[in-house]
Image (spheres, helix red, strand yellow):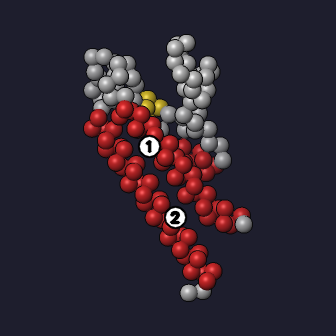
Amino acid sequence: MDKLDAAFNFHQSALRLRSERQELLASNIANADTPNYKARDIDFNAALKGAMAGNSSLSLTTSKTSAEHLNGMNQGGPATGGADAPLFRPIIQGAVDGNTVDMDVERNQFTDNAIRYEASLIMLNGTIKKMLTAITGQ
């Protein structure tokens, strides 16, 4: 069973990180017109290395800066700052209202991440089909 877990561990981690990154990129796109919103992203390679090493701390936590904000996953506490924590994207062209979302960058990153997510699913499906072929002997 350990070999089976090891075979799927990489794909499980990659798909989880791709999914969380997709949510982060969607959040950036959704807040493209929000004043003072800072675009965020994760370093996927560093996050995947951390996940494979077993020390993943990626969680999209929030901190509450106003009593009127909705409660987040990490209410009241500081945001996590691990190596695989969401980072602020460098400003390419800043807006007057302080928003750092560049829709061209976000769309490109969103599409790239979606394609890589789909590729991971195809590779995982291929691995499962090979195992089924080996088990059934066909």
Q: Position of residue 75 (x, y in %)?
A: 61, 22
Label 1 environment density (alpha carbons within 10 Å; few <14, some 14–19, many ≥20): many
Q: Secondary structure at mark 2?
A: helix
Q: As shown in the figure, which amino acid type bears the numbered disc 1?
A: Gln
Residue corresponding to mark 1: 22
Q: Is residue 78 left or right of residue 21?
A: right
Q: Secondary structure at mark 1?
A: helix
Q: As shown in the figure, which amino acid type bears the numbered disc 2?
A: Leu
Residue corresponding to mark 2: 124
Asked whether residue 59 appears in the rendered view, the answer is: yes
Q: Is residue 129 above or below residue 72?
A: below
Q: Position of residue 118 (x, y in %)?
A: 42, 57
* Structural distance between the alpha carbons of marks 1 and 2: 19 Å
Residue at point 66%, 62% (across, down): 5
Q: What label sits on residue 78 in the rendered view?
A: none
Q: Is residue 44 left or right of residue 82?
A: left
Residue at point 48%, 48% (across, down): 18
Q: Residue furthest right?
A: 1
Q: Residue furthest top?
A: 67
Q: Earlier in the sequence, mark 1 or mark 2?
A: 1
Q: Is residue 99 above or below residue 2?
A: above
Q: Is residue 59 above or below residue 123?
A: above
Quarter location, residue 6? bottom right
Q: Position of residue 48 (x, y in %)?
A: 54, 48
Q: Is residue 67 left or right of residue 35?
A: right
Q: Is residue 88 left or right of residue 127?
A: left
**Quadrant into which the C terminus falls:** bottom right
Quarter location, residue 119? bottom left
**Quadrant into which the N terminus falls:** bottom right
Residue at point 27%, 38% (across, down): 104
